[in-house]
């Protein structure tokens, strides 16, 4: 059947269906419902945007520029994701290979926006009391012993007797604050479970305070970042309370910009280094060079050879690109081959 004829039949069937719906009053109901839905969504969007603006009153493009000014180059898609996560007030987890820049992202955000910054490094023996709520027993004893009976005795269970742990400091901060929890995957089970309430509600419960239990909540916006090298899988309850960015190694153009900014070298030289690093990463290495190591190699080449990439300068700086003997041999051979090919072509 010709396409125009088929189209006419479909239109006729659609008109018949619409006519039946109209006669039964169903069409009008559908239209009214759609109008009401659109109005409700518009009102909800206004409210959600107002709440989001209180957390982060920037566009994705402005956020990307803030990070770039601090030397942190995040691509457009990842910046948009970060923008959404921050506006919704969710703790942001960052995954990626070592040296990819996980720890630098929250620091760059804090510096770029002029926010406070609290850092917390995790390890398997870190206890909840060290990061959350604990009483300063020494101060309590000293003040109790100093009391001489004149006037009311000191109240030893107030805020001033709490140890200023990282999480407590974040809740008591009077300005927007970025909290970086580094290598959260190394925490033991007890401390991980303690974190859940803080991640979920941005609050801590203090027991034994004067007057009973008290809940401390953040009075200023908190931006919580968690980094993970995937040392172990995190608990589902922990994952439910977080959203995640997966950082990957940047393309040559972005890597060149990172090297240019980080090492203060011309873009042409940065591009040459970026090209070589990308080629090296294509080799079957035990440990591929990261962004941090690419930056270190770039600086070393400038230091020892004035930016000249030769077999001699490569031999002196090979430790920045390769870590294992087998990798060193593979990288040196590949670079020698590329160097010879380049000069023969020239």
Image (cartoon, rainbow, N blue to C red):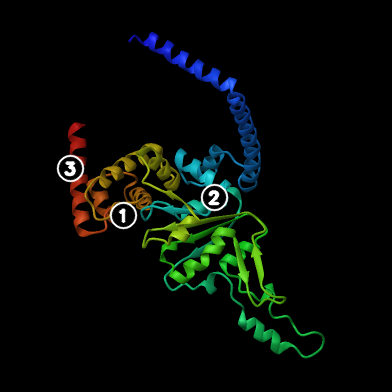
Image coordinates for residue 224, horizontal then vertical, percent: 54, 56
Q: Are marks 2 and 3 in contact (CB under 8 Å)?
A: no
- Residue at the location (47% across, 13% down)? 12
Quadrant of the drawing holding the N terminus: top left
Q: Nearer the viewer, residue 153 or 88?
A: 88
Query: Is 198 or 125 nearer to us in this picture?
Result: 198
Number of other residues with Cα within 10 Å of mark 2, as a class: few under 14, some 14 to 19, many 20 or more: many
The tag on residue 330 is none
Q: Quadrant of residue 167?
A: bottom right
As helix, strand or loop, the secondary structure at mark 2 comes to helix
Q: Which mark is residue 109?
A: 2
Which circle's residue, 1 or 2, is located before the other in the chain? 2
Q: Residues within 10 Å of mark 1 (few under 14, many from 20)?
A: some
Q: Which residue is mark 1?
A: 320
Question: Label for residue 337?
Answer: 3
- Quadrant of res 325: bottom left
**Where's residue 55, x and y in %?**
62, 48
Task: Give above or below for 170 relative to 80.
Answer: below
Q: Nearer the viewer, mark 2 or mark 3?
A: 2
């Amino acid at each position: 059947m010709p396409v125009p004829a088929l189209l006419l039949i479909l239109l006729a069937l659609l008109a018949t269906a619409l006519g039946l719906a109209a006669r039964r009053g169903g069409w009008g109901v559908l239209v009214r419902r759609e109008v009401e839905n659109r109005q409700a969504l518009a009102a909800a969007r206004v409210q959600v945007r107002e709440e989001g603006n209180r957390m982060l009153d920037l566009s994705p493009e402005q956020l990307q520029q803030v990070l770039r000014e601090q030397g942190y180059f995040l691509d457009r898609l990842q910046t948009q994701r970060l923008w959404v996560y921050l506006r919704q007030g969710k703790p942001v987890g960052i995954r990626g290979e070592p040296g990819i820049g996980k720890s630098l992202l929250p620091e760059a955000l804090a510096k770029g926006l002029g926010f406070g910054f609290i850092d917390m490094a995790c390890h398997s023996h870190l206890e909840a009391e060290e990061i959350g709520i604990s009483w300063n027993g020494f101060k309590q004893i000293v003040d109790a012993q100093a009391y001489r009976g004149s006037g009311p005795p000191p109240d030893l269970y107030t805020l001033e007797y709490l140890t200023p742990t990282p999480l407590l400091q974040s809740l008591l901060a009077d300005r927007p604050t970025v909290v970086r929890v580094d290598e959260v995957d190394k925490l033991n089970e007890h401390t991980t479970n303690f974190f859940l309430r803080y991640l979920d509600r941005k609050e801590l419960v203090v027991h034994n305070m004067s007057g009973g239990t008290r809940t401390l909540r953040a009075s200023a916006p908190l931006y919580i970042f968690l980094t993970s090298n995937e040392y172990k899988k995190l608990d589902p309850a922990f994952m439910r309370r977080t959203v995640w960015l997966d950082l990957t190694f940047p393309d040559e153009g972005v890597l060149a910009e990172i090297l240019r900014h980080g090492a203060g070298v011309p873009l042409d030289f940065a591009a040459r280094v970026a090209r070589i690093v990308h080629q090296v990463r294509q080799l079957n290495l035990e440990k591929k060079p990261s962004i941090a190591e690419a930056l270190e190699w770039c600086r070393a080449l400038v230091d020892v050879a004035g930016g000249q990439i030769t077999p001699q300068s490569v031999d002196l700086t090979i430790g920045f690109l390769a870590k294992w003997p087998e990798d060193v041999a593979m990288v040196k051979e590949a670079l020698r081959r590329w160097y010879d090919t380049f000069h023969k072509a020239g």
